[in-house]
Image: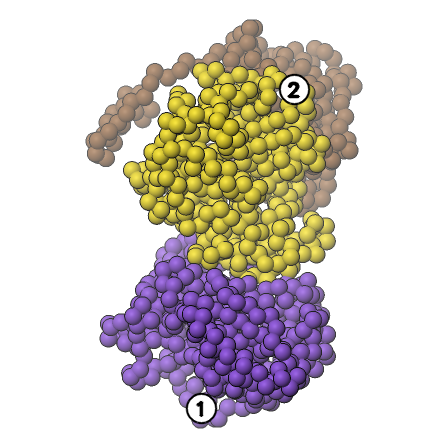
Amino acid sequence: MDSICQSLAEIVGEGHVSNRPEELYIYSRDLGTAEPHLPRYVVAPRTTEEVQQVVKLANREKIPVVPLGGGLTLAGLVMPLRGGIVLDMKRMDSILEVNERARYALVEAGVSQGKLVAYLNTHHPTLVHSEPGAPGQATVAGNVAIHGQGDLAQPYGFNSDMVNGLEVVLPTGEVCRIGSCSLAQQWFTQHPLPDLGLFLGWCGTTGVITKVSLRLFPRKRIRDMGMFVLEDGDLVPDILYRISHTEMAGDLIAWSQELPVTVSGLHNISIFISGDSEEELELKRKLIRVGILGEYIHSGVGGLVGLSANVRPRLPRRPPVSTIQDIKKGGGFEYVGAIMPVDTYPECCRRGAEISARHNIAYTLLGRVIGRSHAMMFSWSYVFNRADEDSVREAREALYESDDLALELGGIPWKPGVYGQQAVMERMDPNTLSLMKKVKKLLDPNGIMNPGNWEVS
Amino acid sequence: MALTEYRYSDVIHRCFRCGYCKFPTSFIEVNNCPAYARYRLESYSTGGRLWLIRAWLNDELDWSEHLGEIVYSCAACKNCAEQCPLPFSDDIVDMIVAAKGAMVERGSVPSAVKEFLENVDRQGNPYGTARSKRGEWMEGTGIQEYDGQEFLYYVGCVGSYDTRAQQVARALGRVLQKGGVSFGVLGDRENCDGNDVGKLGEEGLFEALAEENIRQFKDLGVSKIVTLSPHAFNAIKNDYPRLDGTFEVRHYSQLLRDLVRAGKLDVSSGFKAKVTYHDPCFLGRWNAEYEAPRDVLRAVPGVELVEMERHRADALCCGGGGGNFYTDFLGGSEDSPSRIRVRDACATGASIVATACPNCLTMLEDAVKAEGLDDRLKVMDISEIVGEACQARGS
Amino acid sequence: MDIVVAVKQVPDTSEVVDVVEIDGSGKDIERGTLVSRINEWDKYALEEALQWKQKLGGTVTAVTVGPGEWDDTLRRALAMGADRAIRVDEDATVIDCSAAARTLAALIGRLPHDLVMFGAQSEDFGSAQLGPMVAEMLGIPHAALVVRLQVEEGEAHVERELEGGARDLYTLRLPALLTIQTGINRPRYVSFSSVRKAREKELSVMSLDELGLPPQALTPAVELARLELAPAGKGAVLISGAAEEAAARLATILREAGVI
């Protein structure tokens, strides 16, 4: 153990630090196509105080710090691009408070999506959070740190718009509370205080989030899903726009896949609705299925299939991701997600299918509506065989092309890796870029937080 | 062993690291993998372990004592196999055992594993205690040596040598006597069943043990076997047949259930307590037997059966599998799975946590002491509870 | 580099000390119920030899003087990686150290040997004499209780273990004989299937005659008169109380017992 390792062991306990080859190997690798980067140390803290001390030490020694949640961004955002300390936050996994009346949950940064869903299921069955549909080990804090979205995106927006408060450890080691919690009040609101949103969407480059207060939403007793299928992708934006006008739907996702063969060449729109009674559901069904979809059905351009009544119990279901990704029998999966105008859906699909074809990968395309058609998260997904370098390369190239495509079509890559970050920053207003640089310099004078990411040159 | 020689070389790279292997079905806690629970580093989760195994076989990583410990910290509990969404999920534990096998062939295993295996080889039990003492547990019980009775009561290493487990071996013997069962034991002629030897990757030694046992059972005319331990139950039921040893084997909970239902065991004296049952991995996830032990407990008047949050296929392993009751890679911390498990048990309000496996029994008892819960929670084997209820007492 | 390792097989009394009994003759233990296995120290000697073979190339030959059962230990040595094994067939219970030494010296003398290794002592009689005796008979230098070894260019650099953690450092010119102390390395695990595979390797058995030794070579210099079990201790003294008191009491007891 070198002296820094020794100091880290004194902070978190010997069993929670490692600089051994095995841990360094595992924590150097992302699940996607990004090349590995070795950390020098892996540290798993349990308390905010421990995080503080680690960050202070890192500042003194000028060692990078990279916070890690579930590691499921797949874009290489949690890899130590410049070595240093990977901070595995998952030991900080206590659910501190669920405030039913103000409808929020206060959680430590390492609380997994799965644990939160299960906890609410058991103890607060009338409340849910906007669950992203990633495998359950994804963390709540990681999700807001990258502006993630969940299954309540269409009614309520990005998950980072659902944050009432944060506790963060600044790169210089101070602990800050953002929001009403800074007045030692309930963690129920960020507004009307001056905006200190310097940590959401910054992907861990401005500090370590240690607590999140996340808004919860009403959970109705019954949840239905209907799927509308059509061949003409050009009709999709209109349908989405009109459904979001009704304000009756929950999650609203348009998707198109080459596999399985039964869905190839088609566009599907999954529409979730929920209600406390049959009457409520009937009204919603009528407004959407009869009121909006009816005319498309009658004109023969599409039909309703796969109606699932009562899709309960609401546990993190195994997302299609986990099984689709094994189609190449290779264990690898990565996607470019981009925040796009909903109207770009047809072009995103057309061009996406082209990219996939060129790289020999079955196309897997999806657009999740955010807000009342304000935007959508559109994803181009690529599976690859981890054991086959050519397969990895093909996927990587397809991903770069997708980053470029998103920008070309007028959208912005969401949680991009370094390639996408550069592409975004090249197109950004220079004053805005300069402001980003100022913020980063102000908070992180020694440049220790997840360096190499969102670096304004 | 090069990656190409590894039996699962076409599959080992397919782990996505999605992390379902860490959770139970309900996702209520992230520590349902006993090794991940103990260490909370990605290298100790099943996914991490599989990636490390591949890296080692692919010459990206050298063997080290630490790598050996990571691989051998797997308790073979099958939570990962149960939860993994991928098509090869059933093979996951076998993949890890195959990697252990590669380490065994190379001669590079952690010292505690070496001791375990060498002790079994020499003295027929992992403790290395003399063979000649294997039958001492039965002194004073009146239990007969096997000589053509209906059942062979196979005790196993833990039941024969561990002082606490010996009490259970006796308790079960007395219950069988009370139930009028015709049975005999092998005493110091009994040899290790080999289950844990196999799960430690020593396939050669496992086969030698199994073949010897099969020969011995056949020579003695054994056709029906009842085991104390789910580990022996698993080996005899699932692994002995391919070595030409097919016997009608039951775990004792299954026999007791039959006896109670047939009215042959009178449990009417009852046993008044709030009891929670801990599913052993080798009876539960490995052999899908979740009900027989519960049926037995429910049949005892006075027993109020309550379930832990994580039970049946979601049960948290006590951490004693894969030889860990001896090698102890998962001990020494409040995050040890056995300690988490007894905290789970306490949370039900039960005063007794019932086990059906001598490994679980010893692991949970140590955990109760380590947690300082001695005055709130007692660990009892089902055979001991039934023993009380049918007044088959002794020590 | 050619290395010869002398090994023996001993009764396993590690976990079974309380079942050891003296037999009818009063000069041996009751062996019937005991399992026998390789002498603990010899494991380390074999492991050391095999590691040096891996580093520098060459051969490792395992040798022993003993009965047929001891082929188990030789097979284990072959399974670990020794190239061949030789046993001189004799009843080990009737020969003493000097007789064994003469036999082994005669055998080893005929084999190419840059390095000869013995375990520092045996678990049964524990005399620690055999290695040094053989070295003298072969006329080569030796070092006993080796805990570290470095071999380069015809020389062995060794560290010997003394009391209190002190170490002796020596350089010996090869050929040399070393007796190996436990802890010098981590003996590898020998898998069941590797022992099975080792049956294909060469294991030869020789007689005293073939070594050119007359039967008188086995005349013991030392005769074992009698073997006894140590008397069981007379019970324990439990020392309680505060740390200083307990320490004082303990010091008194140890002083009175002549320990300090």
Disc assigned to residue A432: 1
B2 and C132: which one is in front? Answer: B2
Q: Name the kind of residue labelled 1 in the image.
A: Thr
- The answer to whether residue A438 is above or below residue B145 is below
Disc assigned to residue A43: none
| Figure chain in yellow | B
As drawn, the residue found furthest toward the top would be C25
Q: Name the kind of residue labelled 2 in the image.
A: Leu
| Figure chain in purple | A
Residue C138 horizontal/vertical position (percent):
67, 26
B368 and A202: which one is in front? Answer: B368
| Left or right of residue A92: residue C5 | right
- State which quarter of the image contains the C terminus of chain B: top left
Q: Residue at x 51, y 58 (%)?
A: B42
**Chain letter for mark 2:** B
| Left or right of residue A293: residue B341 | left
Disc 2 versus disc 1: nearer the observer: 2
Q: Where is mark 2, residue-wise?
A: B220
Q: Residue at x 53, y 16 (%)?
A: B144
The answer to whether residue B169 of the structure is visible from this angle is no
Q: Element type at marker 1? A: helix
The answer to whether residue A331 of the structure is visible from this angle is yes
Residue B253 horizontal/vertical position (percent):
50, 33
Find residue A329 and report its image quarter: bottom right
Q: Colour of chain C?
A: brown
Q: Residue at x 70, y 20 (%)?
A: C68
How packed mark 2 is, by other alpha carbons closer than 10 Å (few <14, some 14-19, many 20 or more), is few
